Amino acid sequence: MSNSNYKLIIYSSNPVQYQTPIYKELVKTNIDFTVLFGDEIGFKSFVQKETGITIQWDIDLLSGYKYKFMKNYSRDSREGFFSRINPSIYFELYKYKPEVVLIHGYDTFTTWFTLIAAKIINIKIIWRGESVLRGIENENSLKQTIKKLILKKFFKACDAVMYSCSGNKEYLKFYGVSRDKLFPFPCAVDNDFFQNERMKYNSEVKSIKKEIGIDLNDMVVLFSARFTIRKRPVDLLNALAKIDSRNITVLLVGDGSERLVMESFVKDNNIKAVFTGFQNQTEISKYYFISDVSVIISDYDPSPKTMNEVMNFELPIIVTDVVGTAYDLVQDGENGFIVNVGDIDTISKKIDFLNKNRDELKKMGKKSFETVQNWNYKEDVKGILDAFKHVTNL
């Protein structure tokens, strides 16, 4: 760790597998920082509310950087405004006296309390998040009016604001963030990790497919997400039912409330499907490796990290237009297709096209790989440093 005089506190709700590598990269700079976590969820096992699955991440989330868990007074740490109640962050900021505090999100008591504490102690504030517009923001409702008023005040209090994709940038501009306060913080995953995983399975396509019962020459359509209405997995199954899918297998990685509906549908419509259940970080790569195309067709999804992950495996993407990173990571017709939410006919036609044009599929996959290289943790750290310099005038 550098003996720098520049200090930073990062507030994060809990250890997240997509953020830990950023902290390890940030250690290489001349900023002395500590991450304050609002809860141990993620580091310790928890039951996911949307799916009912017990999750314990199987990768190291804490080594290589300084951190501290603060006491959380919440009754339920899984979701909701009061899922993080960490009053001790005031004393941590007062004791450490950083030039800057970086806040993740605005949806809990602690994020707001941190903002207020930083203002009282005279600490500069950098904020980051991933929300995108949902098309309801201009509704003349009390909820939207209050939200617009509150968020404009929140962002005005921040000295710099970081955006994760073009969709997130538009969201922030809608809520009054000026261009001079905006800094990029690309939605990223650990590209090096997934590319190393890919090399690990390099000669095992046949054995993996045989192991899970997929015909060697089948095009494998990947759906890797929670099986919930929001993620729209049944749209994909409906799309497959509309075409000749005899040489297509849909690989369904995940679990959730829609699983029974999905299992019934594939049986009734003679769709070849493999349900793998939830797969942890060290297990999921072999399923990415044997896949040919990834389908991400949610009706709301700010930055699905699965999309970044599979692009490291040279997969083209079929993605809905409301996904926050869609227009950043997918060039329509180049490395995949952007479709409207619920447009089952178009999803069906695109899958059919890729199945009948396997050479084009491979070409698109290579373009995905090239595209995702620029979405990496070094760029995230650069964004933090640029924002830090901006707010401190260094």
Image (tube, helix red, strand yellow):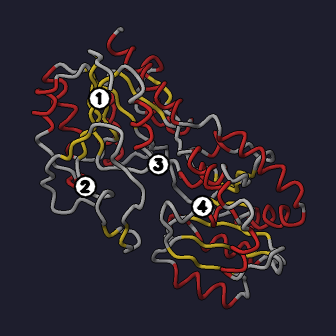
Q: What secondary structure is marked by label 2?
A: loop
**Horizontal and vertical percent position of residue 92:** 14, 33
Amino acid type of disc 2? Glu
Disc 4 residue crowd, few under 14, some 14–19, many 20+, Cα 10 Å: many
Secondary structure category for the residue under label 4: helix
Crowding at dot 2, Cα within 10 Å, few <14 / some 14-19 / many 20+, comes out as some
Closest to the camera, between mark 3 and mark 1, is: 1
> Position of 59 compared to 74: left or right?
right
Q: Earlier in the sequence, mark 2 or mark 4?
A: 2
Which residue occupies 12% across, 54% down? 73
Pick the front one: 135 or 317: 317
Tell me the quarter of the picture where residue 385 sits. top left
Residue behind mark 3: 136
Q: Is residue 141 above or below residue 216?
A: above
Q: Are marks 4 and 3 in contact (CB under 8 Å)?
A: no
Q: Earlier in the sequence, mark 3 or mark 1?
A: 1
Q: Which residue is mark 2?
A: 40
- Please tell me which of labels 2 and 1 falls first in the chain: 1
Give the foreground label among 2 and 4. Answer: 4
Number of numbered discs on residues: 4
Would you name the residue on which mark 1 appears? 33
Element at label 3: loop
Q: Position of residue 311 (x, y in %)?
A: 67, 50
Label 1: which secondary element: strand
Q: Quadrant of the C terminus?
A: top left
Q: CA distance from mark 2 to mark 3?
A: 34 Å
Specify the label residue 285 is tagged with. Answer: 4
Name which quarter of the figure residue 112 lies in: top left
